[in-house]
Amino acid sequence: MTLPEHYRVIANFGAAVAALDSAGQVHQAVPLTKLPQLVAGDKVLCEKEGETAGLRVVSLLERDGVLSRIDRRGQPKPLAANVSHLAIVSASKPGLDTLLIDQFCIAAELAGIDAMVVINKSDLLDDEQHRQCVDMLDVYQAIGYSAVLIDTKTEGKFEPLLDALSGKTLVLVGASGVGKSSIVKRLLPDLDVRVGAISEATGLGSHTTSVTYWYELGSGGSIIDSPGVRQFSVSHLSAHDVRRGYRELADAAVHCKFSDCLHVVEPDCAVKQGVKDGSIAQWRYDNYRKLAEL
């Protein structure tokens, strides 16, 4: 029996996973039954019994930055692991939805994952819309989020995202029609070749539309392409979680008179004062009240 070696789970096909070794080779590996369900991005230890024996996943290493969704029983179900950024994609067509962007920012904050706001289809913006998008991105950047305005079709307009991705592992989320697929195609122009190579190396992957994949990017980063994010929701969050998920509100709240301040009608509220003096964007505060149902 060989000593266990480090691998990266790049796809889970049910009974077996595709695992990437340190040399960049893909292998089929069967997890021990005692292990929790493995997801794309997981770091694992694998071992092989004999030269001709198959690869076994014997240990799951500690996860960091787990993106989960709530299943029908109300329990979190991991979608991807070791994610550093949730790239939240929006566009003027079908419509910029700051409420949805904020929901994903909250979810990222609570999961210990950084958020990145990506406004796509900048080629469709008129001058006024462009100014509004820049103003909105400035607010997110001031809070501490990465924020970029891109276009997948125009030369030079996609590079801001490439620059922002260096060394990061991200999952793309966003409403239908915002151009997530176009972004993936730009990041992974050889996507079909990669999926085919995984299938050939492992004998797995004939049904790829429901499988989450982890891919290395040339920039030194990586992307997890997950169909599961279509069911990703934060509707289960409590008002307390919503408050914690708004960075600038949480920062200001330490100066509120009451530790349990809801930032609505309470006296000496530092958050309301921040909105009044402009240090907290009015529209972010309005979104907070909608999401917290206050």
Image: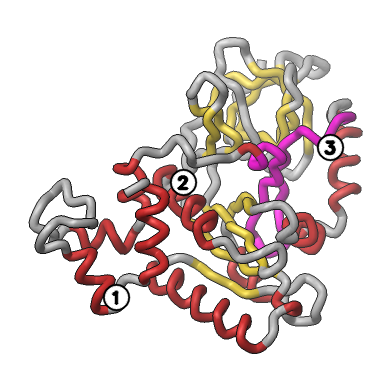
What amino acid type should be assigned to the residue bearing mark 2?
Ala
> Between residues 30 and 94, which one lies in front from this camera angle?
94
Q: Is residue 42 left or right of residue 282?
A: right
Return the mark for residue 279. Answer: 1
The answer to whether residue 225 is magenta is: yes
Cα gap from disc 3 to disc 1, whole angstroms: 49 Å
Q: Is residue 100 above or below residue 7?
A: below
* The label number, if any, that marks residue 198 in the structure image: 3
Q: Looking at the image, which is closer to me, 210 or 194? A: 210
Rendered location of residue 52, percent (x, y): 83, 17
> How many residues crowd mark 3 within 10 Å: few (<14), some (14–19), many (20+)?
many
Earlier residue among tags 3 and 1: 3
User: Label 1: how many residues lie within 10 Å, few (<14), some (14-19) or many (20+)?
Assistant: some
Quadrant of the image for the N terminus?
top right
Quote the CA–CA distance across marks 3 and 2: 31 Å
**Disc 2: which residue:** 107
Q: Nearer the viewer, mark 3 or mark 1?
A: 1
Query: 90 and 95: which one is in front?
Result: 95
Q: Secondary structure at mark 3?
A: helix
Q: Which residues are magenta?
A: 206-230
- What amino acid is found at the position of numbered circle 3 in the picture? Ile
- Specify the amino acid type for callout 1: Ser
Query: Of helix, strand and loop, which one carries label 2?
Result: helix
Residue depicted at x 34% and y 59%: 247
Nearest-to-viewer mark from 1 and 2: 1
Of marks 3 and 2, which one's residue comes earlier in the chain?
Answer: 2
Residue 260 placement (x, y as % from top left):
16, 46
